[in-house]
Image: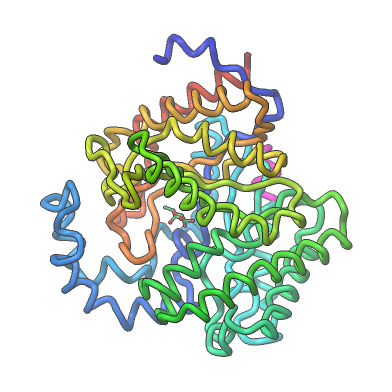
Amino acid sequence: MSESDNSALNFPKRFLWGAATSAHQVEGGNHNQWTVWELENAKTKSVQAEYHINEFPNWEHIKHEAKSANNYVSDKLADHYNRYDEDFALLKQMDMNAYRFSIEWSRVEPREGVWDAAAIDHYREYVMSLKRLGIEPIVTLFHFSLPVWFAEMGGFEKRSNVRYFVRFAEKIIGELGTNVRTIITINEPEVYATESYHYQAWPPAKHSNYLWWRVVNNMAYAHKRVAKSLHAMNRRYKISIAKNSVYFYAGDNAWLSRASAAVMQYFQDDYFVKKFIKHCDFLGVNYYQSERVYGYRIHNPTDKVSDIQWTLAPADLQYVLERLHQKYNKPIIITENGLADSEDENRQWWIIQSLIAMQRAMKNGVELRGYLHWSLIDNFEWAYGKWPRFGLASIDYKTGDRALRPSARWFGRIIKKIRSA
Ligand code: FCB
């Protein structure tokens, strides 16, 4: 499909076209469990980069950044907290009508039980700015960052702590009221649990199967509690988790490959989705990558990988959507989808493939409500720091200048055509 040949694309009028970010990854100037961890670990990470990521495709290009401690400290970033108007203008430039972001809990409740009125006003004004531009706000309540006080009391490891998260959710949604309609309680609970309690790549960097299991279950419980409480405030809130899905497929026809892929898919999706789907009005799906299974091992094709070496298989989005639709029969919003591509070599191709995949899935019965590209702007990619470039818009971290990449300008023209058809 080229730009002139997109007549085949046919999406409903109310389809949500947008992009996503999260507070800690773009706001700058935060103080939370991540910023504490960054300062403690930046030096070590900069020294280890040479050993950990020197096989990445563009190592020569990124090594300068990856070997600098500064890369692992979020610090000012794009200063989205103060410059959000400029970023909303980018959404408008692409003719988008939706934007997913997260509220930074550590700003709203910097000390246990103490609400920061200025921070709450900030987010109220933030949401109102979106509304004035005709952009639907999609709010995430937990996107990996936590107030230091909450992390210090054990975070989601303890069931008795869940009440603090519920209280925060009630407070901020109460303040935003019906200006917000679509809410993601928790972003990728299993990714958070696995990076933080298995791989030790994210704070609190513990290795414990028991804690992993507790965190996963406490998050499912937290989702249920928040969904119930917010629905009691207003039944019309549309609430979900954002579930990261990886697509597993057998690389050959052997019985073992097919069985392993099915088992892996079960543990990727269903093991978790079953815990919370009853309390979801729709399903938020983040899709980035597929895994090819031979026997009981992963062996991926290497022809197309992103800057952080994720296998690029955008067309598989169709199968992810169809499978989740068949299993759970909920409307779906793609809450994240994108790639680290600093040279903007593959992004346009990725988006075309994704649009075709979405279109096919919809033809086959998937009730797809929206597509949110990750990310609106370059941001802090957690353990990798600042060098991976996921943005539709690039950020010059020296000047703070933002500029839509060519693929984003192209995407904007496509969205315009689709929306005016
Ligand atoms: C997802 C996260 C998001 C971002 C992308 C690349 O797993 O939700 O914050 O880091 O990956």
In this figure, which colouring scheme has been used for the structure? rainbow
Quarter for ligand 1? bottom left
* Overall secondary structure of the magenta section: helix
Residue 122 quadrant = bottom right
| Horizontal side of residue 354 vs 310, given as left or right | right
Which residue is at 39% across, 14% downward? Answer: 2
| Part of the protein shown in magenta | 128-134
* Image position of 116 with respect to 19: above or below: below
| Horizontal side of residue 399 vs 355, given as left or right | left
* Image position of 89 with respect to 144: above or below: above
Residue 176 in the image: x percent, y percent?
Answer: 76, 59
| Horizontal side of residue 376 vs 310, given as left or right | right
Residue 218 quadrant = bottom right
Which quarter of the image is occupied by the N terminus?
top left
Residue 77 in the image: x percent, y percent?
Answer: 38, 61
Residue 155 in the image: x percent, y percent?
Answer: 57, 81
Q: How many marks?
A: 0
> Is residue 88 or residue 238 the one in the foreground?
238
Q: Is 346 included in the stretch rendered in magenta? A: no
